[in-house]
């Protein structure tokens, strides 16, 4: 039976980040882990179905809410939530919400938040390397940046946003690391991830990309690419 733990960590700038660590149904002393990072204006819930399949490979999985999202909205004892109206009518509206939220809760800190979680898991929980970061959209560029701050063995970046979101220098440094990268996008991604993926994979020593037809963005791409991502993750699994 799977074991679930409710966890929280506090960032240097006072955000209390909350998440859930799921251990697989295996008798092992320590587990490799996959840390999932969701996209803007969603929560950790978007990963639940896919994360269950990842645990079947023998990984523990951490699903947490990003700063300003879901249950991670307290900063220094006060609520600091992203700006978003789910009834938005256009891509322009969505981009406007994103830009306002980026400065309000400081999206540039997200790679540090991911690194904080990875460090916590290794020190406090039954986690060992390999560790893999999986992120989508805002999370997709953030997991790349996190590599420059805390070692990961692999990264899956789905529909990554522009590097400027977390800092171009951080992303450039991460892409030079000896890490297995898998980039996923649709060719006509509405936010330009299709073109960006080609640029990012070209800056790695051995990264690979999966480009689908159409204009799907983020976790909606899992319906086409899930089996390939699971195959990528299998090489990091310690399941016997």
Image (tube, rainbow, N blue to C red):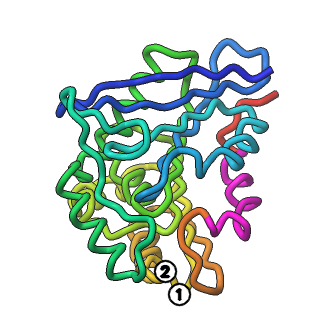
Q: Which residues are magenta?
A: 220-234
Q: Main secondary structure of the magenta part?
A: helix
Q: Is residue 147 visible?
A: no
- Residue 194's label in the rendered image is 2
From the image, tell me which residue sits under label 1. Answer: 188
Above or below 18: residue 123: above
**Residue in the foreground of this view, choosing between 105 and 85:** 85
The image quadrant of residue 95 is bottom left
The answer to which of marks 1 and 2 sits earlier in the sequence is 1
**Residue 222 falls inside the magenta stretch:** yes
Q: Residue 177 in the image: x percent, y percent?
A: 38, 51
Which residue corresponds to the image point at 75% horizontal and 23% vertical from the top-left? 2
> Which residue is painted at 72% across and 60% down in the image?
226
Disc 1, SS: loop
Q: CA distance from mark 1 to mark 2?
A: 6 Å
At x 64% / y 28%, what residue is drawn?
22
Local crowd size for mark 2, using a 10 Å CA cut-off: few (<14), some (14–19), many (≥20)? many
Disc 1 and disc 2 in contact, CB within 8 angstroms: yes
Question: In the figure, is residue 48 to the left or right of 92?
Answer: right
Residue at horizontal 45 percent and vertical 63 percent from the top: 137
């Amino acid at each position: 039976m799977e074991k679930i733990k409710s966890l929280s960590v506090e960032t240097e700038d006072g955000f209390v980040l909350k998440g859930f660590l799921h251990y697989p149904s295996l008798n092992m002393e320590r587990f490799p882990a996959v840390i999932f990072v969701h996209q803007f204006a969603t929560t950790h819930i978007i990963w639940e179905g896919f994360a269950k399949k990842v645990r079947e490979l023998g990984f523990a999985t951490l699903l947490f809410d990003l700063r300003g999202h879901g249950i991670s909205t307290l900063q220094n004892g006060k609520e600091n939530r992203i700006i978003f109206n789910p009834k938005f009518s256009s891509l322009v509206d969505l981009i406007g919400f994103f830009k306002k939220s980026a400065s309000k809760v400081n999206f540039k800190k997200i790679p540090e938040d991911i690194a904080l979680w990875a460090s916590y898991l290794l020190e406090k929980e039954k986690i060992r390397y390999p560790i893999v970061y999986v992120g989508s959209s805002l999370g997709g560029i953030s997991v790349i940046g996190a590599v420059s701050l805390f070692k990961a063995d692999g990264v899956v970046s789905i529909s990554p946003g522009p590097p400027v979101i977390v800092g171009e220098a951080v992303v450039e440094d991460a892409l030079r690391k000896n890490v297995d990268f898998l980039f996923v996008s649709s060719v006509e991604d509405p936010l330009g991830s299709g073109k960006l993926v080609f640029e990012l994979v070209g800056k790695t020593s051995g990264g690979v990309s999966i480009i689908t037809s159409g204009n799907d963005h983020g976790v909606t791409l899992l319906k086409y690419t899930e089996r390939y991502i699971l195959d990528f993750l299998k090489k990091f699994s310690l399941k016997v």
